[in-house]
Image (spheres, grey):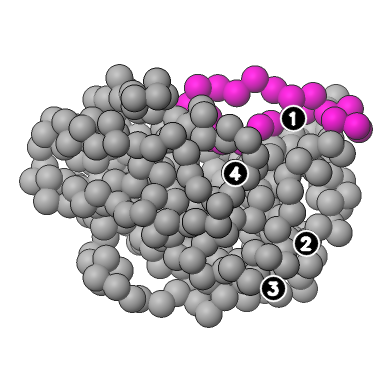
Amino acid sequence: MLTDEFGRRFFYLRLSVTDVCNFRCNYCLPDGYQCTGAQARKRPLSVAEVRTVVRAFASLGTEKVRITGGEPSLRRDLPDLIAATSGAAGIRRVAITSNGYRLASEIDRWRDAGLDQLNVSVDSLDPHQFERITGHHKLEKALRGIERALELGVETKVNTVLLREYNLGEYHKFLQWVQATPVTLRFIELMRTGDNRSFFASNHVSGGDIEKRLLRDGWERLTRHRSAGPAREYRHPDYAGRIGLITPYSKDFCADCNRLRMSAQGALHLCLFAEQGIDLREAIVGGDHRALAELIRAAVSGKTAGHQLAGGRAGATRNLAMLGG
């Protein structure tokens, strides 16, 4: 079992397959994707290399893999990546995070390849506000994809980054949607990165304020599964869907961390906001998953107790597309 010196056990891998994104979200890539730096110029891991990574993590007790980006659907071989992941012995759950751009046309193929869970970014339910945030008039397409995923029985979650100047006023509209739609809507605190300091200052909203509203209105907190992500989830008897909160600025947020990250170029990141990744590409290309597993085990011993976001330090994370958040 993969365990660090603080006793945290790691059941969950967030695996980036590209750092390219076709959206221009104002909190992440307001100027669009820029191919800069030596890492960005390296080719992303191939299907065979992803298989090696997943086998290594599975041998260390990882049960869940989330495929992220950038935008993973920009890779034409995404169904093969999903199949390579779901086919690894010990992996019980394969998830993907997407902006929904190709969801309606591709979700059937992803499900057939072995996808269990889907997360879709929807930062506004108003088409004009959605375009203002993302740079694309694609809300209807994303919602159609979500509808199809639900028809297929794919567990679906929706990610909404809380933005004071853009979507905070839609709180009740989001809840009305969840009342009739069986998704888990997760409100995510805006995180400060190397590229969004002034935007963060004017738009950050504390998830604690949302939690107070939920508890006041009769929402009940659910028990978190050991391979679940960082969200605290809530249910209400009058709602078809659920609400989740991801609050990285809350006290002890890192105390029960259960996840590690691998970049699209083969760097292991012990934290989203670590100062740097650990380059394992050579071992990955070598194809020996057992040797790779030993390198991962050794690296995890250096994981720190927590991030330094509250102190304004975002580490090497320039933007969230680098590792999928």
Pick whichever of labels 3 and 1 is earlier in the sequence: 3
Q: Which residue is mark 2?
A: 164
**In this picture, residue 240 sits left or right of residue 248:** right
- Tell which of 255 and 312 is nearer to you: 312
Query: Which amino acid lies under the numbered mark 3 shown in the image of this protein?
Result: Glu
Q: Which residues are magenta?
A: 215-235
Residue 157 vertical placement versus 35 (above, below): above
Residue 27 on image: x %, y %: 61, 66
What residue is drawn where x is 34% and y is 27%?
A: 4
Q: Nearer the viewer, residue 190 or 147?
A: 190
Answer above or below: position of 241 versus 11. Answer: below
Q: Label 4's element?
A: loop
For residue 234, which numbered disc appears in the image?
1
- Quadrant containing the N terminus is top left
Residue sitting at 81 percent across and 44 percent down? 209
Looking at marks 3 and 4 on the same chain, the residue that comes earlier in the sequence is marked by: 3
Earlier sequence position, callout 2 versus callout 3: 3
Q: Main secondary structure of the magenta part?
A: loop
Q: Nearer the viewer, mark 2 or mark 3?
A: 2
Confirm whether residue 45 shows in the render. yes
The span from disc 3 to disc 4 (Cα, nearest Å) is 26 Å
Label 3 residue SS: helix
Write the residue at 26% across / 57% down. Answer: 265
Residue 289 in view in this figure: no
Residue holding disc 4: 248
Q: Residues within 10 Å of mark 3 (few under 14, many from 20)?
A: some
Tell me residue 15's x, y (percent).
37, 46
Residue carrying label 3: 131
